[in-house]
Every structure is written in structure tokens, then in C-alpha cells.
Image: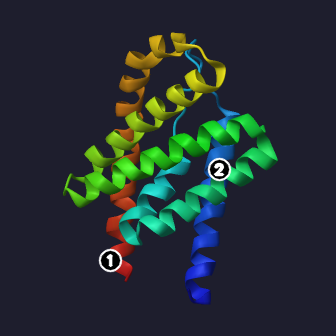
Amino acid sequence: MNSKKITLIALLAAIALIFGYIESLFPIPLPIPGIKLGLGNIVILTALYIFDFRTSVLIMFIKVLLSALLFSTPSAFIYSFAGGLVSLLVMAIMKKLKFNIICTSMGGGISHNIAQLTCAALILTNINFFYYLPILIIAGSIVGAVVGIVSKIIINRVSAML
């Protein structure tokens, strides 16, 4: 890996971290835990389309690790990493199957929520978390669509510069 790519990965991870921090400053006033705007996922989805799966996993891991160390707890790292990894796997498969970026992002948002609920249910040995699943699927679809639209705009502009 050359120094230009390492620098770009570090920059993208920093941007994702900043987006995640900004997002934490404005919690969504809903009685359902776990619904977030997913601003950091814009960077990760964009990286998946501009680079490759491996690079986007690296950026996601750096973002999740630093977020947990700076702003959160070790348990938040476990939930975020599980959600991020499953989400990236689903998005990589959907991208390979030629789904458009908006559908791919929606699949990522939904799978992220399912992975986090599953992780919480396993760690806390309580399946009652799955009562939130219908609402989180709707939220993951909406947030995923917005993230997909923004990522598509960014990719189109960046591609024009390359």
C-alpha cells in the first residue's frame, strides 16, 4: 500500500469519525434506542464503491475503534463493530449482484440494525430486543436511502475529478 492510499484512508477514517461525533451531538428524539442518522456510513459506503471491500472494512474499523475509545464504551465497540461488519458484508454482496447504490445502502442499514439487535440479544441473553425490529427495519431503510443518495452524489463528483 503506497503512502498516498494510506493518507487517503486516514483522511476518510477521520471524516467518518467526525461525522459520527457530530451525529452523537444531535440524538434523534425517539423512544426507540439505536436509531441514528448514520452520517459516518456515507464515508464507508463511498469507500466501498471507490476502493474495495478491504479498504472500506479498514476505514470502518478505525472509525468504530476510535469512536469507542474517544466517545463511548467497550460494549459500544462490540455492537458497532458487529453492525458495521455485517452491514459491509451485505453491501459488498449487493454491490457485486449489481444492486444500485441506494438499495445497497438500504440493505446495509437494515442489516446493521439486525446485527446489533442480534449482538445485544446474545450478550444480554434477552430476545425482547427483537420487538424493536420492525421499527428499526423502517429506520434502516429510510436512513440507508438517504446515505445512498448522498454517497451517489459524492461518488459522481469524485469520479469526475479522477
- How much space separates mark 2 and mark 1, taking CA atoms? 30 Å
Residue at x 63%, y 46% (from the top left corner): 20
Specify the quadrant of the image occupied by residue 50. bottom left
Earlier residue among tags 2 and 1: 2
How crowded pointer 1 is (Cα within 10 Å; few <14, some 14-19, many 20+) is rated as few
Q: Is residue 98 left or right of residue 26?
A: left
Q: Is residue 35 left or right of residue 63?
A: left
Between 151 and 103, the residue placed more toward the observer is: 103
Specify the quadrant of the image occupied by residue 144. top left
Task: Mark yes or no: residue 73 visible.
Answer: yes
Q: Secondary structure at mark 1?
A: helix
**In the rendered image, which residue does mark 2 sit on?**
64
**In the rendered image, which residue does mark 1 sit on?**
160
Three-letter amino acid code at the position of disc 2: Val
Residue at x 41%, y 63% (from the top left corner): 48
- Up-down relation of residue 74 to residue 46 (above or below): above
Q: Position of residue 97 (x, y in %)?
A: 20, 56
Task: Mark yes or no: residue 28 visible.
Answer: no
Residue at x 52%, y 46% (from the top left corner): 84
- Up-down relation of residue 17 to residue 141 (above or below): below
Three-letter amino acid code at the position of disc 1: Ala
- Up-down relation of residue 101 to residue 76 (above or below): below
**CB under 8 Å between discs 2 and 1:** no
Specify the quadrant of the image occupied by residue 5. bottom right
Give the residue furthest to the bottom.
Answer: 2
- Up-down relation of residue 148 to residue 83 (above or below): below
Residue at x 35%, y 32% (from the top left corner): 141
